[in-house]
Amino acid sequence: MKCVRCLLQHNLRWTGPSNAVPRVQTLQTLQTTPQQKQGSRYFHQSRTVLKNQPTSPVDFVQDKGKKSVVQDDLFERVAKKTKTKATFNRVVDVFTKQDVRRRGHVEFIYAALKKMPEFGVERDITVYNKLLDVFPKEVFIPRNFIQTMFNHYPRQQECGVQLLEQMENYGVMPNVETKVLLLQIFGEKGHAVRKYQRIMYWFPKFKHANPYPVPHQLPEDPVDLAKFSLKRIAADLDAKITVYQMPCTDVSESGQEITFPHIVGVQSPSQMELLAKHNPKRPLFVEGPFPLWLRKTCVFYYILRADPTPPEEKVEEPYDPERCFDYPLQLDLDFGRDLGDEEDFDVEDLDEGPVFAMCMTNQGDQATLNQWLSGLQETNPILGQIPTLFRLDSGSRELQASPDSRPGPEPKSEQQQQQESHAETEEEEEPQRRRGV
């Protein structure tokens, strides 16, 4: 500091008017040079950073949108003709090899998760592990409790959680490789690892909770699909499934091709007994179609039913005590009751009538359902004595009235208008009376 002060005093010494300007310039250079060096050292940036730096928020949003579009184009360019598991893995390999630092890996993983159903790999655990391997390792691990508390690298952790949520939605169980990859990427305290722990806790508990599971791959044959669907609908294990007609095509005399639909029906022995005891004077009804959803596939079925039995025709049959030895079907217990106890229970019983048979076909016209009834008549001869009516629903083909064409309210008479106005004035005066009281 003393040397600098002496140097300044030496430069400020008066030597004449001719030397005044250069000495003042020397003083300015001595005062400004250290600040310039310190400022240039603090704000130094390379040319590549300045070139890639967005100029405005609008440019930044456009750049982000371009990245997502580029990732989608990568899938379209690599998998032009066929979209299979091999082509999907090839796209992931192309992305991992083109940049060592894996820049834009979050956008790529989001685009890959969106494209997985198109390639048919949404239920493949190896593909999910391959996408997790795209994340850089040991970069997003929190080093202290503050980083853990403030969600260290939130975009990457949200992307990992989104990948696990898609696995959960498709029912894919993580394996040991998934756990190792998550620990290498996010550490033991990451949100993605906690999501993995929750999945591994709940999935084994609910894996076999459904007593009637539906397979992921449904049969493609319509007859096999109808058999599977009717077996699920029928509550009786002794129900017998019968194929009344197989799908086929025939050529008529005029040379026109005629397509015959498939007809598959189901009926249990108890339904056959109920149909044999049915009163021939009361008609039967063929109703439908009723929808049945099997995952993303919707099938339709038809039923043969009757109206509820009138109370005067109901006959209560006594229970057979030897019918079931595990538990009694009827209990006669005489408990001591008080005078205030009610023996009647307010239970609303809704009797919809018995269902005698069900069938599935891809053409729900009356001619096709008549073929089903003729096939049922071979095992149920009473059908030849009972009249049958068809109640077929046209579904969405039925015309619906628009809101403009609905009839409006009838015009009110003058007497009704006077009564309404008189009631409104009374309602307005009533609060004022209360206030006066």
Image: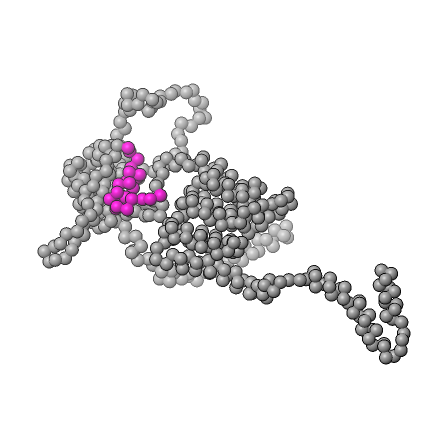
Query: Residue at point 74% right, 65% down?
Result: 36
Q: In front here: 311 or 254? A: 254
* Residue 134, x across and y down, in percent: 49, 50
Displayed quadrant of residue 141? top right
Displayed quadrant of residue 53? bottom right
User: Which region of the structure is painted magenta?
Assistant: 216-237
Q: Is residue 434 left or right of residue 159?
A: right
Is the residue 103 above or below the residue 356 in the image?
below
Q: In front here: 324 or 431? A: 324
* Residue 241, x across and y down, in percent: 23, 38
Displayed quadrant of residue 123? top left
Let me know if residue 225 is in the magenta part.
Answer: yes
Is the residue 130 above or below the residue 1 in the image?
above
* Residue 4, x across and y down, in percent: 84, 63
**Most distant residue in the bottom direction:** 18
Q: In front here: 221 or 391? A: 221
Number of numbered discs visible in the structure rendering = 0
Let me know if residue 52 is in the magenta part.
Answer: no
Q: In front here: 301 or 393? A: 301
Q: Is residue 4 left or right of residue 396?
A: right
Query: Residue at point 44% right, 26% down?
Result: 341
* Residue 407, x across and y down, in percent: 36, 60
Specify how the rendered protein is coloured. Answer: one colour
Query: Residue at point 52% right, 43% down?
Result: 182
Q: Is residue 119 visible?
A: no
Q: Is residue 189 visible?
A: yes
Query: Residue at point 36% right, 51% down?
Result: 84
Quadrant containing the N terminus is: bottom right
